[in-house]
Image (tube, rainbow, N blue to C red):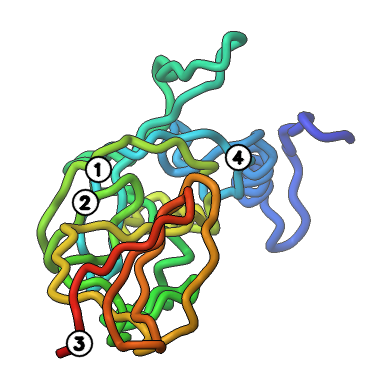
Amino acid sequence: MTKGQYPTIHRGLGNLTPDLWLRLMNMLSKFEQKDKDETSNGMSGKFIKPFLAKITKAKCIATNRYEYAWIEVSLQNDNTIATVTGGRTSTGSTDEWDYAAINLLEIANTATRGSVGVNLGADDFPSGYALQCLGGGNASSGSEVTPIVLPIVVMNKVGGRATQTVSRFVFANTNETDGTCGLDDLLMTDAVTAPSASTGQAKLFVDNADGDLKVIFADGTTKTIATDT
């Protein structure tokens, strides 16, 4: 007997009754179905191959962490993306968050640290900037945001059951930081040896010869902006 063959047993042996054999064959048949998961009609919990998905919305579940609504897409011959008709989606019987995905790289995020090594609490971290959800935009815990760009990710499933509503679809992409530039002051070394001119550049510096703030232009011309008096 090979895969795909599920014979009907008419004679049992002790506790191995024909009814039990029938149940076992039905279980084997469902187990051997190809690439089933709980977002498809078969509602199996079997692992599936990675597929492309477009992120459509993000919901903050903790500081600098989100879950993501998504739809399945495919890559076209001209390198554009098309929604898969009848494809998989995060939308279940309740809403678009039933099978929401999580970004594995966000798991280690905290209020002051990004998992890719960004120190969000550092003194030199720009004021007005914040870690963004994938695609850009941020929200407070429990709130939703539509990303500025709807990114395409490689989606995977790491387990789950037919009745699951916990995020079990996963991808791994880095978050960016963004915000409003609010410059309160400019830090410069006080003082330095006058730099040489560089093509296409103008350089600000505090001259150690007299303590004055100066600029040297690309042609070598040096001008004093403010004197240290």
Between disc 2 and disc 3, the foreground one is 3
On residue 137, the disc is: 2
Residue pictured at 55% horizontal, 20% vertical: 75
Does residue 187 sit above or below 177 in this rendering?
Answer: below
| Residue that mark 4 sits on | 30
Could you tell me if the residues under marks 2 and 3 are in contact, i.e. CB atoms within 8 Å? no
Circle 4 or circle 2, nearest the eye = 2
Disc 3 residue type (three-letter): Asp
Q: CA distance from mark 1 to mark 3?
A: 48 Å
Amino acid residing under circle 2: Gly
The mark nearer the N terminus, 4 or 2, is 4
Front-most of 29 and 69? Answer: 69
Mark identifier at residue 228: 3
Spot occupied by residue 98 in the image (x, y as percentages of width and height): 27, 48
Q: CA distance from mark 2 to mark 3?
A: 44 Å
Residue underneath mark 1: 147
The quadrant of the picture occupied by the N terminus is top right
